[in-house]
Image (cartoon, rainbow, N blue to C red):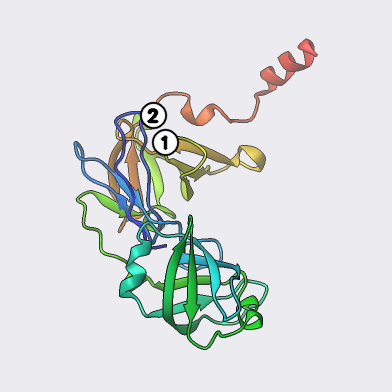
Amino acid sequence: MESPRPPIPQGPGKKNRPVSDNQPAEAGTPPGPYRPHGARSGASASSAWVLLARLVRPHGRHGEIIAEILTDFPERFHERRRLFLIPPPRIGTPAREVLLENFWFLRSRLVFKIQGIDSINDAESLRGYEVAVPAAERAPLEEEGSVYVSDLVGCHIFDLNRGGADVGEVIDVDRGSSSTDLLVLRRPGVRGAQAEALIPFVRDYLVQIDTAARRIEMRLPEGLLDVNAPLTDEEKREQHNRS
């Protein structure tokens, strides 16, 4: 999605808000901050696309459609006329090019008027489609130290406090459940509910990001990755004895 990532806070208690592909994330080499921007590219979109919005339902009688905003830069629709609609996976058809006639804000959402979509039935047929542009056309990052969330996804985190060990792959960025952005990590060799870990995306932990090499270097506090680790046999016995 086409958004930049906000700056990385000084510590876990300070907000660091990444941006989606429509939002860039602000990254920098210490002492500069890292800030993710834009909404995430989304599960139904490939890295070839940047998601800007998701069509929710018809609005009005002439083909207008309410959309959920997936970008940090919705005002840039003023500069865009050519868009692409990506269908839900169940439909399985390729993305189609459309022309944007008009748009306006409706509280926290957008209303689109797309050329050729002129009735309630036309609009209803697009429910669940995602509005996107090619990744090559995403908004340039103007803030120093910014990085796109989509560029973070797929990177591996190397913990310098563990001798540079690869502790897992970033599979998502959680921007909503905490005051600090969280990197969602898939841990190698771990299955089930413990296969994922959350790492605060803050300057205190971050050393360097190299998106070209798909590499993020961090210094993680001891025990951070073990908070949600599976119980050891001894811990299971102790838990059984207490029950």
Rendering quarter of residue 39: bottom left
Q: In which quarter of the image is the N terminus?
A: bottom left
Tell me, for residue 12, which label it has, or none: 2
- Determine which of the numbered discs, if any, sits on residue 195 in the image: none
**Marker disc for residue 180:** 1
Residue 234 rendering spot, x and y as whole percentages: 68, 17
Determine the secondary structure under disc 2: loop
Q: Earlier in the sequence, mark 2 or mark 1?
A: 2
Task: Indicate the position of residue 209 as horizontal and vertical percent values.
Answer: 29, 47
Say which of 66 and 218 sits in front. Answer: 66
- Picture coordinates of residue 118, whole percent (x, y): 56, 85
Pointer 2 with pointer 1, Cβ within 8 A? yes
Residue lying furthest front in this view? 61
Amino acid at pointer 2: Pro
Could you say where residue 12 lies in the image, as x and y percent from the top left?
Answer: 39, 29
Q: What residue type is labelled 1?
A: Thr
Residue, x 47% and y 28% (percent of image)? 224
Looking at the rendering, which quadrant does residue 100 occupy? bottom left
